[in-house]
Amino acid sequence: MPVLIRPAGPTELVELPAGVTTRAPSVADTVPLGRLYFASYEPGAAAATEAEAIEDITLTFESAYGNLNLDLSRLACLDDVLIAAILVVDRAPWPDTPDCPFIIELFTSPTHRHQGIARALLASVPGQVALRVAEGNHSAKTLYTTTNFHPWP
């Protein structure tokens, strides 16, 4: 999967849809966040089962993918229900990634897509940040290229 990077600099201000709020994630969010993670992808794309998705989120909080930055990571909620998330580590643990904050996950509930939530979550992360994007995920690639991400290196 190619790595994309957004250089340091101002990001566009993107307002969330009416009623949507954001907050930092906590370990108490593990199960609902895992369920949302599983529901946000085609079956088998992120995890084969909901239990595997919850385990993956558990590993995220245990720093298996780098130190989760709770100031940069955000959960989007509507009426106290999780509908989207951006999970950012201080630096990815993989050698083929840049030395900067790294988005390990950005996902939105299928029922809340195309409302600007993912774009607003991306805009909420200040400065330089990188991520990976799957080759065939054209909608994600479009989102990232229109928010100033470029191939790295």
Image (cartoon, rainbow, N blue to C red):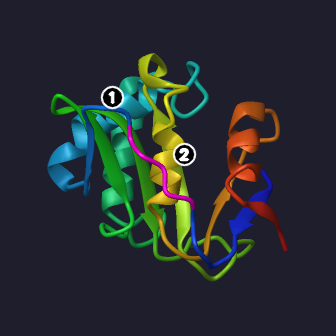
Q: Residue at x 75, y 40 (%)?
A: 142
**Residue 39, horizontal then vertical, whole percent:** 43, 22
* Cα distance in 3D space between marks 2 and 1: 22 Å
Crowd band around label 1 with a 10 angstrom C-alpha radius: few (<14), some (14–19), many (20+) = many
Q: What residue is shown with label 2? A: 119
Q: Residue at x 43, y 26 (%)?
A: 109
Which kind of residue does numbered mark 2 sit on? Answer: Arg
Residue at disc 2, secondary structure: helix
**Residue 4, horizontal then vertical, whole percent:** 74, 61
Crowd band around label 2 with a 10 angstrom C-alpha radius: few (<14), some (14–19), many (20+) = many
**Residue 37, horizontal then vertical, whole percent:** 42, 34
Q: Are marks 2 and 1 in contact (CB under 8 Å)?
A: no
Query: In the image, is 23 to the left or to the right of 56?
Result: left
Of 118 and 134, the residue lying toward us: 118
Q: Residue at x 49, y 71 (%)?
A: 126
The label on residue 35 is 1
The quarter of the image holding the C terminus is: bottom right
**Residue 49, horizontal then vertical, whole percent:** 44, 24
Q: Which residues are magenta?
A: 12-16
Residue at disc 1, secondary structure: helix
Which marked residue is nearer to the observer: mark 2 or mark 1? 2
Which kind of residue does numbered mark 1 sit on? Answer: Arg
Q: Residue at x 23, y 36 (%)?
A: 31
